Amino acid sequence: MKNNKKVKVALNSVFWSIFLTLMKGVVGLITGSLGILSEALHSALDLGAALLTFFSVRVADLPADERHPYGHSKIESISALIESALLFVTSGWIIYEAIKRLFFEKVEVEIVWYAFVVIIISIFVDISRSRALMKVAKETKSQALEADALHFSSDIWSSGAVLIGLVCAYFKVPMADTIAALVVAVVVIHAGYKLSKRTFDVLIDTAPAGIAELIENEAKKVEGVVGVSKVRVRPAGAALFVEISIEVSRKISLEKTKMIGNSVEEQIKTKIGESDITVHVVPITLDNETIIENIQILAHTHDVFVHDINIHLVNTKKYINFDLEVKYDLTVFEAHSIASKLEESIKKEFGDDIEINTHIEPLRSNILEGQKIEREEREEIIKKINIISSNFKDIHEPHNIETRKINEKIFISFHAYTPGNVLLEKAHDEAGDLEYLIKQKIDNIARVVVHLEPKE
């Protein structure tokens, strides 16, 4: 839809350029007016520029492909640059003819009524199409259409200068027509300079002023972003290609990191509009990281998990204990090698004056086939659980008791109540004691899991 609108207004400009070129050319040759002839040449070049614009807007919105990963939008910039060159060529010819008539040749200008009509029509046409082109250019952010609009805006002023020259020539003011042509040349040179400068900036990837600071500020608004280390912006037609590196805490999970990156992309797009944004996430160490968090992060870099981390300080020496989870099918040698590498990383982080004790636990990642326990055996297990738990002050009413057998080993899980105001550490210790006693009192137990629920 957007491309159709661009093509339609560009094609309309082509038809008007053909009409104006023929009209000015015929009248200029009949009257001998350099001002009108210069306008005719200007319109002829306008026709070439309009055709180039029509071609470029059709190609520019083609999707990106393997050979053009950033799309085809820069064809509009090339079109605008060629149009700038045409403007300078036009100016050169006008200045040459004006100097020749001022100093070397005397040319009589025939003033007829239709010469005025041609210029007045030209002014109204240029006003109409420059407005139409600029409107669509702003809606679609098309540089080629904006260049055409700027071009035809300058035509309004140059046609006005020719009209004044014709009026002066009608009243026998010497050289008025030639001076009007020089004014046209100056206006065209000015338009060409502005257009070529803006186009050249796009072709050498000059970012819009202040855009990098704007993008950085928008990224910092996203929760979880602690800094921005790099912003790069390159324009390509209506779109901006943005690369930004954001800094986040290395404690954050990969999934959370991805969410932050997506939020940054959406935040920037909301502010700058059509754009292609690549977000690089750089994990960094924050000053407020705890020792336990550091150990967890180091374990993650070794692709292992640790839990139940305890740190003790005795006479300035640190003692670190934790449980390390590794794959269940490793040999003792392989598991110990992983633990040793992790311990080396921890010592490198905190210094050698620490004592590390690692408890290695096998971690199963596959699903095991189990079976239900016979009714009589299950009832006996439940009875023993109730008896054992009755000896605990803060654990009572075992319920939702599940029992199953895997590889001839019994697995038990159940819920129990504990007062809601009991400290978690104390409740955890009591649950651990209960699990231990159940394993001691019931034969062939592989694992017991107690889930405590608060109850006033």
Image: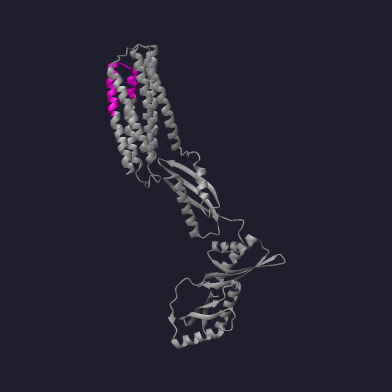
Place residue 86 in its image quadrant: top left
Residue 267 coordinates in the image, percent (x, y): 47, 50
Q: Is residue 387 above or below residue 304?
A: below
Looking at the picture, does residue 29 appear above or below residue 360? Answer: above
Q: Nearer the viewer, residue 322 or 424?
A: 424
Residue 82 seen from this side: no
Q: Residue at x 72, y 66 (%)?
A: 315
Q: Image quadrant for the C terminus?
A: bottom right
Classify residue 286 as left or right of residue 84.
right
Q: Position of residue 194 (x, y in %)?
A: 44, 30
- The total number of labels drawn is 0
Indicate the quadrant where residue 309 lies: bottom right
Compared with 385, 218 (above or below) is above
For the magenta stretch, what is the residue range?
18-41
Please tell me which residue is depicted at 29% across the width and 34% down the height of the picture: 12
What colour scheme was applied to this rendering of the protein?
one colour
Q: Residue 40 in magenta?
A: yes
Q: In the image as oriented, which residue stretches furthest toward the right? A: 315
Task: State left or right for residue 68 relative to residue 391.
Answer: left
Tell which of 342 and 313 is nearer to you: 313
Quadrant assignment for the N terminus: top left
Residue 404 in magenta stretch: no
Image coordinates for residue 433, horizontal then vertical, percent: 59, 79
Majority SS type along the magenta span: helix
- In the depicted view, which residue is nearer to us: 392 or 183? 392
Q: Residue at x 43, y 28 (%)?
A: 193
